[in-house]
Amino acid sequence: MNQKIGKKEIILLIVIFIAILAVWLGFRMMKTDAGNLVRITVDGEEYGTYDLDTDQEIPIEIDGEVTNTLVIRDGEADMIEADCPDQLCVNMNAVSVESETIVCLPNKVVVEVIASEEEAAFDAIAQ
């Protein structure tokens, strides 16, 4: 029952550790930044842009009727109501990271997290 750990086993453990560390660092570097604005479009037309730092409830009206309700709270945007039959947009997770979206296909509503123009310009210069 006395087994010694050999040189090969130690090298294998070191290689596995380095591979895990490399994958972890890769994911950390690829992580996108949190956006600070939400842009709502209805049928391809911009409906409005809202600050993620301001808690608010946004009724989205199409042809004078409220079809969707978006809530911004604690830096996240969440679709809480929709009059569409499938309710997929309501069941989607809240969004807060740049380029994340919530889509309501029946009502042609798209909610997208974006960076402010100043932040986007800074990112372009930094790259």
Image (cartoon, rainbow, N blue to C red):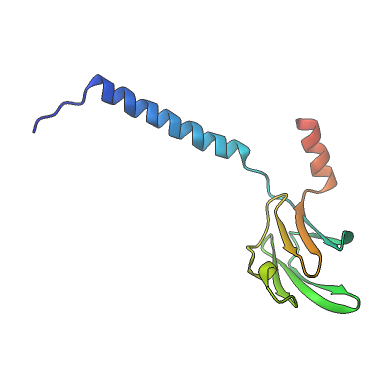
In this view, the residue farthest toward the top is 7
Residue drawn at x 56%, y 34% is 26
Q: Position of residue 85 (x, y in %)?
A: 71, 77
Quarter of image, res 8: top left
* Looking at the image, residue 28 lies above or below residue 63: above
Quarter of image, res 113: bottom right
Q: Where does the C terminus fall, quadrant-wise?
A: top right
Q: Where does the N terminus fall, quadrant-wise?
A: top left
Image-based side of 104 in relation to 74, left or right: right
Name the residue nearer the viewer: 125 or 94.
Answer: 94
Q: Position of residue 21 (x, y in %)?
A: 46, 33
Residue drawn at x 44%, y 30% is 19
Q: Position of residue 64 (x, y in %)?
A: 90, 78
Residue drawn at x 62%, y 42% is 31
Residue drawn at x 80%, y 42% is 120
In this view, the residue farthest toward the left is 1
Image-based side of 113 in relation to 121, left or right: left
Quarter of image, res 9: top left
Number of labels in the image equals 0
Q: Position of residue 104 (x, y in %)?
A: 75, 66
